[in-house]
Amino acid sequence: CCAPDARGSRTEVELQVAGEDFITAGVVVSDRGWLEVYPYSNWVNDPLPAFTINEVVAFASLEMTESRTQPPPLLSEADLISVMDRHGIGTDATMHDHIQKIQTRTYCIKNADGRLEPSRLGVALVEGYQRFALEEGMDLSKPLLRSQMEQGMAAIARGEQTRDAFLQGALSIAQRCYTALERNAPALDNALAQNFTGRDQVGRVAPVARQAFSTCRCGSPMDLRIH
């Protein structure tokens, strides 16, 4: 049993003011359909007033606001699903599992606003991958490789590619990725080190539970610290 289609209309209005173009859009949802049972996507009912072509619109106010560029907002699950869908990654049945997996592996966490916030581990991995991306001709932080594999599996389903040919290509890519990571391990280690405090640094500031509890083979006393 499948949920019915969601139905709505989108209106886009272009205004000209002193030779400058301004564009706005509104959405009217007439039937939420599958949106009622699929929480990872949403249409917001935001209608515009009725306009006619070449209508002269009176200004209620005109303001100049001083501001600065801001970083893009963090992605919600619905935003991430839209990006994955745009790159052809995953299906409706697997996308949520992918998103849960990156949280389980602590590459990101869901903050109080319900948005996915990169963790230090996630940032360190991306920085490490990008350090050798130009040299190796591949960036593992980008969706290209995964998208290509998804396209290959879809081609098998359509009968356009054989399983053996796909496996050969996928294994070749995996081997290339492994070799690149192994060759550039120091760069990845350095990226991780910049985002995490080393064990020796943590140990030096940890409180001493017992002084000189033992002796090293070199003869120096050893303190027991707990952190």
Image (cartoon, rainbow, N blue to C red):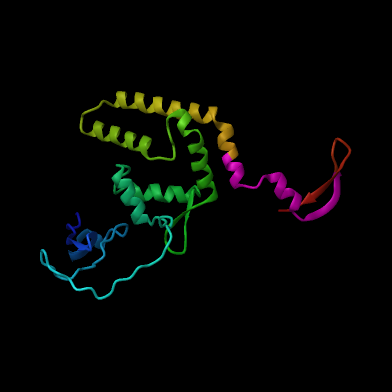
Q: Is residue 215 magenta?
A: no
Question: Residue shown at 54%/30% (left/top)?
Answer: 184
For the view shown, which residue lies furthest in the right direction? 219
Question: Residue shown at 85%/48% (left/top)?
Answer: 213
Of 213 and 68, nearer the camera is: 68
Residue 32 seen from this side = no
Residue 2 located left or right of residue 41: left
Of 103 and 73, nearer the camera is: 73
Quadrant including the N terminus: bottom left
For the view shown, which residue lies furthest in the bottom direction? 60
Of 152 and 136, nearer the camera is: 136
Percent position of residue 97, x then y? 38, 48
Residue 121 located left or right of residue 99: right
Residue 67, picture quadrant:
bottom left
Q: Is residue 198 magenta?
A: yes
Q: Where does the magenta region start and end?
A: 191-214
Percent position of residue 222, x then y? 83, 45
Task: Classify 117 as above or below 131.
Answer: below
Residue 202 seen from this side = yes
Question: Residue shown at 35%/68% (left/top)?
Answer: 64
For the view shown, which residue lies furthest in the front direction? 18
Residue 19, picture quadrant:
bottom left
Percent position of residue 177, x then y? 45, 30
Residue 130 located left or right of residue 24: right
Percent position of residue 10, x then y? 18, 60
For the view shown, which residue lies furthest in the left direction? 53
Number of on-image labels = 0
Task: Classify 100 as above or below 16.
Answer: above
